[in-house]
Amino acid sequence: MKYILDHEGKMYRKFFEDIASIPHESFKEKALSDYIVKFAEERGLWHHQDEVWNVIIKKPASPGYEGHDPVMIQGHIDMVCVKTADSDHDFDTDPLALYVEDGFLRARNTTLGADCGHGISYMLAILDDKTLKHPPLECLFTVQEEVGVGGPKHLDYSLLSAKRLIFTDSMGEGAPEMSTTSVLGGNFVKPVVFEAAGQEGNGAAASSPSKAAPNKAAGQSAALTHFYKISVGGLAGGHAAVDINKGRANAVSILARMAYELMKAGNIKLCSFKGGTLKNNIPNTGEMVVCTELSDISSAVAKMDASIKAEHKETDPAPFVKAEAVSAAGRALSIKTTEGIIRWLMEIPTGCYMASHDDASFPLTSRNMGTAELMEDKFVIGYMFRTSVKSHLEMLFDAQMVLCGIFGASWEKEYDYPGYVSEPGTPMYNTYEAVYKSFTGKGLKPIRIHAGTDVGSLIEGMGGLDVIGIGPNTYKFHTPEEALDLASYDRAYQYITGVLAKL
């Protein structure tokens, strides 16, 4: 393996490059989990790997710290896998193509995985270094965080005893997260049945919106012989928590709008539909194939393209809606089923629901329609609710269940997990602040985040923890523009080891 970073005295940099060479998408973390187990075996450290590939490694206290209470350090080993539209990167097999630009570590045309690769690299370096001063350590490497914080639900908490936690899934130097949101995620599912794609409308359309198809007298049917692939792209996307309040376009919603515009002019059938990659991301691309009686949809597409560009000129880099004629598909949904799905998509809200009264830039509650896909026998919408207001969760979920009842869909929960709230002034907070001041002369700037992490689940599982988040400046995570500030990366490691020496 060819390394690109200077590792001298900075072994965490080497470990980050090792991590980046091993595919580790959510639910596919086994190879990285096995790497971590091998790391522990080679150093003679106690370790435990469970059935979902969480790993616990314990390191004895350094000399003079044997009587100190243990400390847990935690980070998640899965990463969000997103790439540019023109990338041929295979996240199942290919190492990330790392490079350095202007002091930032990036991955070419893909996400970097600094969320939470930087934290995992810190933990491995701390376990590897025999010169550090620290209490007994319980290093916890969790899985499935990016898709619903699944790892902590499978932990055997009897193997852990620490009541103090440093979590490394923290993205701002000197800005520890003091609260996270409660999260509910899953899929809305509508059963579907395919039929012949080019079959005539034969009166099967639901009450289409103000529809009077060209060249068709009232009551007559027309063959649906024209096939188009409609694509949406050039959107910023982003993290469905961090970026949900920035007004960014949602590719699934745009596809639904485009389909509805076509429905106003004539009958259409969905042959395929796919948008987004993760519930936890704002979908930045999508495409659908439709068959229709309309021989020319160029004006409708141009109108939608112009609308999206105007609406999102301040939020998205180069939004587009385009269409191309394609070969006939063999099957499609019926006109009635198609219209039901499109109407349903048009009704589903996505984005910030309520902002904080004392800080309008901070969302208290949001919803994200992260994915939508037409599958073999069902149409599936991946959805997440996030909130700092618990009553909102039930209210907004009930609202979506009303829509499910109207459109013949159901809900399949994948996960729900708690948020947490901490306050400045705890022993762990004060220790970090003392270390941070010794390096920078500044105090900490605590923040709250509209996101979920493993921490709330760990606090519940351990019956309470004194927690602090320590990490470097990382930007645009969950996007191919993700960047890790290398100077900050180096400093944050010094903060963590400095805190350990004081505990």
Image: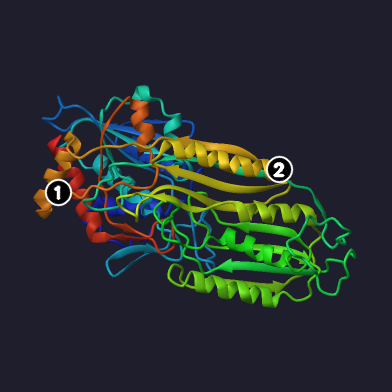
Q: Which residue is mark 1?
A: 436
Q: Upstream in the sequence, badge 1 or badge 2?
A: 2
Foreground residue, 262 or 79?
262
Binning the other alpha carbons within 10 Å of mark 1 as few (below 14), some (14 to 19) or many (20 upward) gives many
Among the 4 quarters of the image, the one containing residue 260: bottom right
Q: Residue furthest top?
A: 158
In the rendered view, would you say 339 is above or below 61? below
Asked if labels 2 and 1 touch by Cβ distance under 8 angstroms, the answer is no
Number of numbered tags placed on the structure image: 2
Among the 4 quarters of the image, the one containing residue 259: bottom right
Label 1 or label 2, whichever lies nearer to me, is 2
Distance between the alpha carbons at the discs numbered 1 and 2: 55 Å
Q: Which residue is mark 2?
A: 408
Residue drawn at the location 24% of the way across and 50% of the way down: 175
Residue 287, x across and y down, in percent:
63, 63
Residue 498, x across and y down, in percent:
15, 44
The N terminus: image quadrant: bottom left
In the rendered view, would you say 39 is above or below 154? below
What secondary structure is found at the residue carrying circle 2? loop
Residue 177, x across and y down, in percent:
28, 45
208 relative position to 463: left or right: right
Among the 4 quarters of the image, the one containing residue 183: top left
Under mark 1, the amino acid is Tyr
Foreground residue, 174 or 405?
405
